[in-house]
Image (spheres, grey):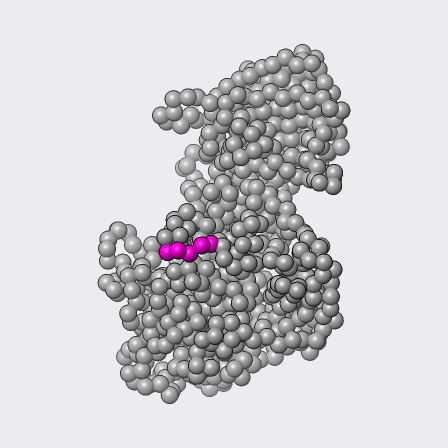
Amino acid sequence: MEVIGYTDRFSVRPGETIRFMVSCTQRAYRADIVRLIHGDPNPRGPGFKEKAVRTAVSGEYRGRQQALPLGSYAVVENSPALAFGAGFTIAAWVLPTTPAKGLQGLVAKWDGDGGFGLFLNERGELALSLGDGKGTFETVSSGRAMRQGEWYFAAAAYDAEGGMLRVVQQAVVPAPGVLEDTSVAIERKVDAIGVGGDGAALLMAAFWSKNDAGRPAVAGHFNGKLDSPRLFSRALSYEEMESLARGASPASFGQALTAAWDFSQDISADKVSDTGPNRLHGCVVNMPLRATPGHAWTGRQPDWKLAPHEYGAIHFHDDDLEDAKWEADFELKVPAKMRSGIYAAKLTTARGEDYVPFFVRPAAGAATNRILFLAPTNSYLAYANEHVMELPLVKEIMTSAGIRYPVSLQDKYIVREKLNSLYDYHADRSYVHYSSRLRPIANMRPKYDMPALVSGKGSPHQFNADLHLVGWLEAKGHGYDVATDEDLHYEGLAALSPYKVVVTGSHPEYWSAQMLDAIEAYLANGGRLMYLGGNGFYWVTSFAPGKPHVVEVRKSHGTGPTQVVPGEWFHSTTGELGGIWRNSGRTPQKMLGVGFTAQGFDRNAPYKRLEGSFDPRAAFIFEGIGDDELIGDFPSLVVEYGAGGFEVDRLDYSLGTPRHALLLATTTGLSDAYQHVREENPAITGLHGGTVSPMVRGDLVFFETPKGGGVFSVGSISWCGSLPMNNFDNNVSRLTDNVLRRFASDEPL
């Protein structure tokens, strides 16, 4: 991609300012603001539609490349207490996940020329290095590589008076059946040297180096866990190191103790707390994983809040990224007359383009329409820069089908820049649990197709698929306002209450507790909800305190390509139990009437009307639709054919569907490529496919709620992809229009 960018916020109101950060490989690019109307260029539909908006942004800008500062670490600012003349000891518990990937910092006060530090060397061996800043260096290593995924007590000491370097590498619990113990203790005589790096901050999980311009830069990112780093102002003996490994309090070493960081404190914050006498507190950068088991984890307590001493580790990754920290190229103060909707900064070069989306809300307290489109930005963040096709199994399937990945410029950028979604693994094969909007999101774009769909041919999903709905609203003349998941989380019911009806996107999968509370209160007060998607209200999602740009998801006991490992079920940001909402008693069926039941990616299916569709309560829904007419029995812009598919939801009274809910229609003809969800299959049989399982279906449901409210649910991701077909003239469009016009009116249900 020659040009790509991101914004400092997702949504903005008139009078507020939004900033745009851009990286461009060319000498110049042009920026314009456009209103996005229909994002899919597929010739079977109405095609791509945008509308230029005249603003002060329009013009030429100087191109410059801005790098992504990947990699998490902890930093402790320099202090006189960290100046060791006569010697020192560094100790920590270490679990490496890529031990031989190259030189990695563990605990290092190193300025690129000198200092001291505990490292993993290129062979995965524990090493202590000293440098006087004048070209003299000394290093001693354990000589034995650490094993991936095993805990070690690591300690190293320098005795200036005795001229000695000492390294201890001790496996905490040697793996069963391992013939070679990688524990080792090494001591070597050296000439006494001074310790440089006096001005450098101390880093954990990285070290200071110098970039091409000779400026300090963070390098040597460690993949793995660190637990309880300690610093002492003298060289500890072997016996003292052994007592520390067995759990001796660092305070028992008296005045020798310089710092004792306790990562089990402040788990929900960026802070790393020093319990030692000098209070050398630090902070983590780029959101490494917290609330993860440490070396003392017994497995008896899965909740870190109830046994914090067992969760004293931080898992660092060389591809973590919370904030790209690019400089802003331009900004937009939203004009007072700019109507609510979905917009983008359109960036163009001679050969390339990028669209940087944002959402304009009406002025505070001044809703301009009866309809609110709730943009599922949490789901956009969950899939942000997703490259699940890089997973070995998926890649093998696609390769066997003759499909290469990556193909699109966006996917090439994602892979090259090592960006991750909540569907991907880190470089060390651990799961990704945090996602941020303060970075380029190359697949949250109009014109983008998710490459894994339709056997690798690709199909719109998430943001681009939701523009099918936006294009339909525009074509049918429905006035609407826009808000985001983030807005709903922080404003609650106040974000919804001005509106007669709330319309969801095609895949509103990720919901916080605050969002669920708000939608429940909205429905209880007479609000009306049109759930026009599938697999919605599914994963527990948290916003990091003080960081509205970061969401956390820990997937367990649900259906998806990633699941958390034992001990990581509870969120670090809020302490709440992760997984799917049904495990906390908040099933989607209670609010939507339907809940996730199956997924498949080969072909959708139409809906067949059932008895409930002929109930007089539902007569308004089916005006103009024949008794035997299949709904959505025609090509679709999502997964090629049919209105019901991709991921589908079913009615289930036992899971909370209101008893008075009407089952209006259900899909017919889903293949065995559709499989019943994991959380409902206690036994593995051959009866989970679409041709044999009655649970594999998408249901159309309607029910009334108190004070004149109501809910209409389609139970299919692909529904919105059928709306634009035949220039928006089809029975999916007609039925949806019937419901929306009634829901937006004052006429009772």
Residue at image coords 58%, 15% = 187
Q: Quadrant of the C terminus?
A: bottom left
Residue at image coords 60%, 43% = 71
Q: Quadrant of the N terminus?
A: bottom right
Please tell me whether the stretch drawn in magenta is mainly helix, strand or loop. Answer: loop
| Residue 503 can be seen, yes or no | no
- Asked if residue 552 is positioned above or below residue 96 in the image, the reply reads below
Q: Quadrant of residue 711?
A: bottom left
407 relative position to 548: left or right: left
Q: Quadrant of residue 181?
A: top left
Q: Position of residue 730 (x, y in %)?
A: 41, 82
- Asked if residue 461 is positioned above or below residue 255 in the image, the reply reads below
Instruction: Give the residues drawn in magenta, as a range.
Output: 401-405
Residue at image coords 68%, 70% = 32
Q: Position of residue 579 (x, y in %)?
A: 43, 52
Residue at image coords 64%, 24% = 129
Q: Position of residue 480 (x, y in %)?
A: 56, 78
Magenta stretch holds residue 680: no
Taking depth in this image into account, of 174 and 633 the one nearest to the observer is: 633
